[in-house]
Amino acid sequence: MSKNLGVAEAKKRFSELMGRIVHKGERFIVERKGKPVMAMVSLEDLQKLEQIPEKR
């Protein structure tokens, strides 16, 4: 399950979040003005996502 946080909080806690992503497999959704704009995931998760064929 992903956890949501704002851009300012993600910036302030970047190093901590990176550790949680890399070592615990956590995922984060970063929001700007209350709207999701990006995800922070491990390289392993990204590689899995990139293996999924795109639907056209």
Image: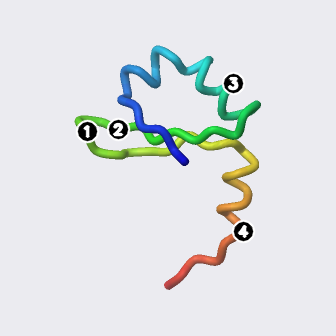
Instruction: Identify the element where label 3 is drawn.
Output: helix
1 or 4: tag closer to the N-terminus: 1
Residue flagged by tag 1: what amino acid is it? Gly
| Front one among 24 and 16 | 24
Position above or below: 23 against 11: below
Q: Is residue 54 left or right of residue 47?
A: left
Label 4, residues with CA under 10 Å away: few <14, some 14-19, many ≥20: few
Which disc number belongs to residue 31? 2
Give the residue at mark 3. 19
How far apart marks 3 and 1 lie (CA) works out to 24 Å
Please identify the residue farthest to the left as the structure is shown: 33
Q: Please tell me whether mark 3 or mark 4 is closer to you in this view.
A: 3
Q: Are marks 1 and 4 in contact (CB under 8 Å)?
A: no
Q: Is residue 14 left or right of residue 53?
A: left
Residue flagged by tag 2: what amino acid is it? Glu
Give the residue at x 61% y 18%: 16
Q: Position of residue 9 (x, y in %)?
A: 41, 21
Instruction: Identify the element where label 2 is drawn.
Output: strand
Give the residue at mark 4. 51
3 or 1: tag closer to the N-terminus: 3
